[in-house]
Amino acid sequence: MIRNSFILLERISELSEKKIWQQGIHDWNSFISSDSVKGISPVRKRYYDNKLSEAKKHLLDQDSKYFSGVLPVSEMWRLYDTFSDDCVFLDIETTGYYGDITVLGMYDGRDTMTLVKHRNLTKENVKDILKRYKMIVTFNGLSFDVPVINRYFDGVVPSVPHLDLRFPLKKLGFTGGLKQIEESVGIKRSAATTGLRGEDAIHLWQEYMSTGDADALDLLVEYNTEDVLNLKPLANFVFSSMKRRLSENFR
């Protein structure tokens, strides 16, 4: 989808992009090879040609960081099909809103990685895992998870594209929390975690710390693991829905 996108260019809005597509110019190559583009001056067309050629080079090099600087935050979903094999789904549990991190869960579509406070939750471990990936996927992570992690571990999150699913889901008409949206799109949870919410995660940690109840910690980890596992089908849903929504503008 990123190769069909012109919104990464300066002064190109969603409406401007739609007008480009409606001229039959559907990707970077067709833009560059066109003698002219209606609504864009020859001087600006040459400038855009250079910027798109630059974007092509960075894409060929799999340099995802370049796109985090040129794509609007709400449009990061357009990179998902390109970097889906190199992305990490991430979610944290805390002692309270912007409190200490108790569990940090990550999933790359193959392996689940769980870091727990007082065990293996260290800056070195977080940094070592995150540096492997070219994209981060969260739900509400731009407002919550990433600022908390960066505060807790002194800016450890790399500056790769961050797909916060909350933004495209809002465009698709979905509001509310992650669990509510999961239910709306048919994503199921286990019997053990169905009905649990963020405040329950706080209580489970408190119970574990005060009593040493291993079952409470196990349930908290299971809850967090489902959070990150469910982000992948949700991201797939978002990408296919948003792509279908934009494809209507090609005509």
Image: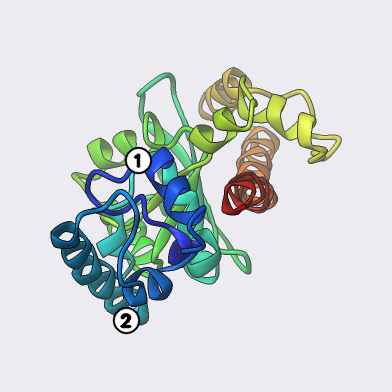
Residue 168: % across, % down: 53, 37
Compared with 72, 63 (above or below) is: below
Give the mark toward the camera: 2 or 1.
1
Residue located at (36% from left, 30% from top): 100
Compared with 207, 244 (above or below) is: below
Residue farthest to the right, as pictured: 191
Q: Which mark is residue 61?
A: 2
Regarding residue 77, the answer to whether it shows in the image is yes
Cα separation between marks 2 and 1: 26 Å
In the image shown, does 51 or 176 lie closer to the viewer?
A: 51
Residue 251: % across, % down: 62, 52
Amino acid marked by disc 1: Ser
In the image shown, does 169 or 194 lie closer to the viewer?
A: 169
Q: Which residue is mark 1?
A: 13
Residue located at (18% from left, 44% from top): 154
Q: Secondary structure at mark 1?
A: loop
Regarding residue 193, the answer to whether it shows in the image is no
Residue located at (37% from left, 56% from top): 6
Amino acid marked by disc 2: Asp
In the image shown, does 187 or 167 lie closer to the viewer?
A: 167
Q: Secondary structure at mark 2?
A: loop
Task: State the image quarter where residue 31 is shown.
Answer: bottom left
Q: Is residue 202 left or right of residue 143?
A: right
Q: Earlier in the sequence, mark 2 or mark 1?
A: 1
Q: Is residue 39 left or right of residue 189?
A: left
Compared with 18, 4 (above or below) is: below
Please say if the residues under marks 2 and 1 sit with CB atoms less than 8 Å apart.
Answer: no
In the image shown, does 110 or 41 lie closer to the viewer?
A: 41
